[in-house]
Image: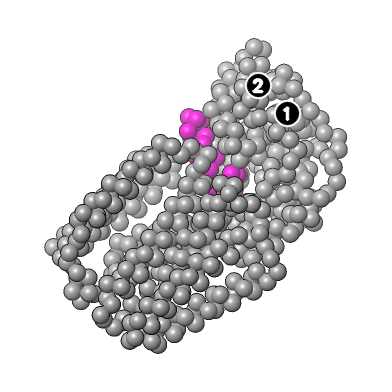
Amino acid sequence: MNYIVEFSYLLAAVLFILGMKLMTHVKSARKGNLLAAVGMFVAVAATLINMKSGDASAGIPASIGWPYIIAGIIVGSIIGMLFSKKVKMTGMPELVAILNGFGGGASVLVAISYVWAKSSSVLSLSDIITVMLSILIGSVTFTGSMVAFAKLKGLIAGRPIVFKGNNLLNGALFIVVLASLVWAVIIRSDIGAAHMMLLAVTIISSILGVLIVTPIGGADMPVVISLLNAYSGLAATATGFVLGNSLLIITGSLVGASGIILSNIMCKAMNRSLLNVLFGGFGQAQQKESKEGEYQNIKECSPEEAALILESAKSVIMVPGYGMAVAQAQHAVQELALALEKKGVNVVFAIHPVAGRMPGHMNVLLAEADVPYEKLKEMDEINNEFKQADAAIVIGANDVVNPAATQNKGSPIYGMPILNVHEAKTVIVIKRSLGAGFAGIKNLLFEYPNTLMLFGDAKEMLKKLTQEVNEL
């Protein structure tokens, strides 16, 4: 029986890796997702078979509790189906945040249950270390993800919430958790005292998760989402060691490693270190910067004027941002692109790595609108093409096109790689107002002599533009 279970775990792990490989391209992403789902089914089935025999050495009873498992599958499936039907693409960042939290919370519950199931036994050294790590990482992931969800959802302020001594308190709590870990190792023969220590670590780690995420502002939220995803993977890995489950160790490691790599990529795209994101005083800098002088020499245009410019262009680069997501204007963007292409205009899309509120946010939205993947250009690929572009259309993007990142050494975003939109012959910025983006700073692009502001809702303005282009 063990051979069947281990082979099933190996098969599931291979399916997960193949699925992730296929998900690197939009065309094969659907197939990759299906492969990964099949892998998960195989993994769950093998785990249930393994549970049926129990594990006397680990103190795990053979009673499998089928009613509870079936009830869990039914309730979980219903919730998953409701999410897939109800949650809009613009709500994906919030959904990912809360799912990360569920992963961390599940790791905590499994680790605690494992210890409680062995209440009559003495905990081994490996038991207590892996359980404590699972609880520490899982609790931080759960509460941190809940705060990230609340910020993205607008339930609490998206700006950095900091207080004097914030980092000092975080450091002190982390030291207390480590000391508790050492103490739990020492007293592990006293099962009752060990239980109390685990409870204390759960509470302190949960507070730590809140204090780590609340000082992080909306501009850094893509990195936070990616990092919490990595944490949920690491928590799963620790839980895998607790249960001695090789598949959980493999899948947790895959999620943890990919999340850390993605976080690193996101940090490089913002020219910031991970430590700076977690502990930097970006929030204070934003507030100071946002008090700069008023905009001057702003040139406004109408949809009719913008359509004339676009209709006479040979090449146009569209730059989507979070404003496009909020307005749910991805289909309107595609309609404008198709209208321009009918006029013989070459249209491509420039994607900044941190555009939106989640890694890959813009790619997913544009794919939903059937924008061909070949037309999506990453920052490094497209930046040299802005000089040759007749026009660039900025749709709800702000900080990722702000020339202050390359020109103003005093700016909090100085050094952050941006899309060189200002180098296009004409720049049309579709925006509701001159309000600041996530970084809370003035955008120098709006004052450029080649920039025209088209004020209004992104979806409405794009539809008017398309109508005007079609009538020309």
- Regarding mark 1 in the picture, which secondary structure is present there? strand
Residue depicted at x 47% and y 47%: 95
**What residue would you read off at disc 1?**
454
Q: Camera-side residue: 128 or 439?
A: 128
Magenta residue check for 357: yes
In this rendering, the answer to whether 423 lies above or below 235 is above
Residue depicted at x 33% and y 48%: 76
How many numbered tags mark residues here?
2
Q: CA distance from mark 2 to mark 1?
A: 10 Å
Q: Is residue 91 visible?
A: yes
State left or right for residue 167 relative to residue 414.
Answer: left
Magenta residue check for 189: no
- In percent of width and height, residue 188 lies at 35, 84
Q: Is residue 350 visible?
A: no
Residue depicted at x 46% and y 65%: 139
Q: Which mark is residue 465?
A: 2
State left or right for residue 439 relative to residue 171.
Answer: right
Q: Which mark is residue 396?
A: none
Q: Tell me if label 2 and label 1 are in contact, CB under 8 Å.
A: yes
Work out which residue is located at the far left of the displayed protein and give it.
1
Q: Which residues are magenta?
A: 352-375
- In percent of width and height, residue 441 lies at 75, 48
Q: Camera-side residue: 86 or 315?
A: 86
What kind of residue is marked 1? Answer: Leu
Q: Image quadrant of residue 435?
A: top right
What kind of residue is marked 2? Answer: Leu
- Regarding mark 2 in the picture, which secondary structure is present there? helix
